[in-house]
Amino acid sequence: MRIIKFEDLDALSEYGALLIAETVNDNNKCTLGLATGSSPIGIYEKLTKLYKEGKVDFSGVNTFNLDEYVGLKENDPQSYRFFMDHHLFDSININKKNTFIPDGSADDLESVCSEYEKLIEEHGGIDLQLLGIGHNGHIGFNEPGTEFSKKTKVVELSSSTRQANKRFFSSIDDVPTYAITMGVETIMKAKKIVMVAYGADKASIIHDAFFKEVTPLIPASILQLHPDFTLLADKEALNNI
Ligand code: GLP
């Protein structure tokens, strides 16, 4: 595990974007695992800038997102598909056919999950997986108590996660109760994992996840065991350690 501390979110995002651009420039047909939430937005902005400056070409790249809410259509402004289009895909030269996000509006969610795992394998696995972290230690939507061995699955969201995410909805009742998420096993299979965390409100969970023992009660703690895991954090998230 490597931990890199930054002065601020801007410097962190610049570094994260360069790491991703480097992965793409090494292999222009690579497969990226992407995340939503506020943490990666700065990285997506910097990646868009690198693309506009001609420093990275996404035309052959494949992407798989970590998760999606159940019950939202892809054109719903709260869906993660909408988020990704808005924050990244619409601004770079990626082929939308190569951008995969679980379809949370499908009737048969179980087959969406097994198909997603199959597709990731068919694309050679994930070269670099980007992650944020929930205040309760969730990664993707793998909530505390989740089995480390699980693959892509349907999960019920914890009330703390629904509360945290209600800022994007008009009321708590509009926040979906279920989601599809890559499992911990899916995430751990990525060749390289990069987590982004910023702000004082993440300091306590960062401490519990990476400076204590590995436990399913804090799903992110398993990342300590990944052979190529890097945490990019600002000084507030590291509690000025
Ligand atoms: C959501 C996403 C997670 C993300 C988390 C943290 O629950 N499913 O993938 O890591 O939010 O979001 P933020 O970066 O806004 O704190």
Image (cartoon, helix red, strand yellow):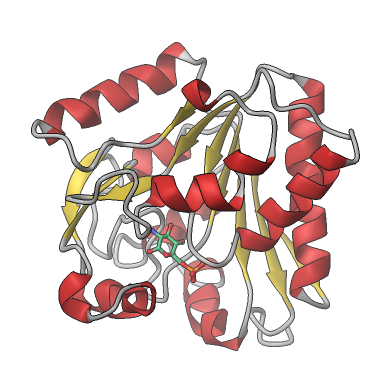
In the image, what residue occupies the spot 20% across and 50% down? 70
Q: Toward which corner of the image does residue 151 lie, by quadrant?
A: top left
| Residue 121 in picture, x, y percent from top left | 42, 17
From this view, report whether residue 182 is shown above or below residue 195: above
| Residue 23 in picture, x, y percent from top left | 75, 31
| Residue 80 in picture, x, y percent from top left | 40, 51
Q: Toward which corner of the image does residue 43 lie, by quadrant?
A: bottom right
From this view, report whether residue 14 is shown above or below residue 225: below
In the image, what residue occupies the spot 39% across and 53% down? 140
Rendering quadrant holding ligand 1 = bottom left
In the image, what residue occupies the spot 47% across and 53% down? 83
Describe residue 141's horizontal placement relative to residue 132 as left or right.
Answer: left
- Quadrant occupied by the C terminus: bottom right
199 or 46, which is in the foreground? Answer: 46
211 or 91, which is in the foreground? Answer: 91
From this view, report whether residue 128 is shown above or below residue 184: above
**Residue closest to the far left:** 107
Describe residue 173's horizontal placement relative to residue 146 as left or right.
Answer: left
Q: Is residue 185 visible?
A: yes
| Residue 77 in picture, x, y percent from top left | 38, 57
**Residue closest to the far top:** 122
From this view, report whether residue 239 is shown above or below residue 111: below
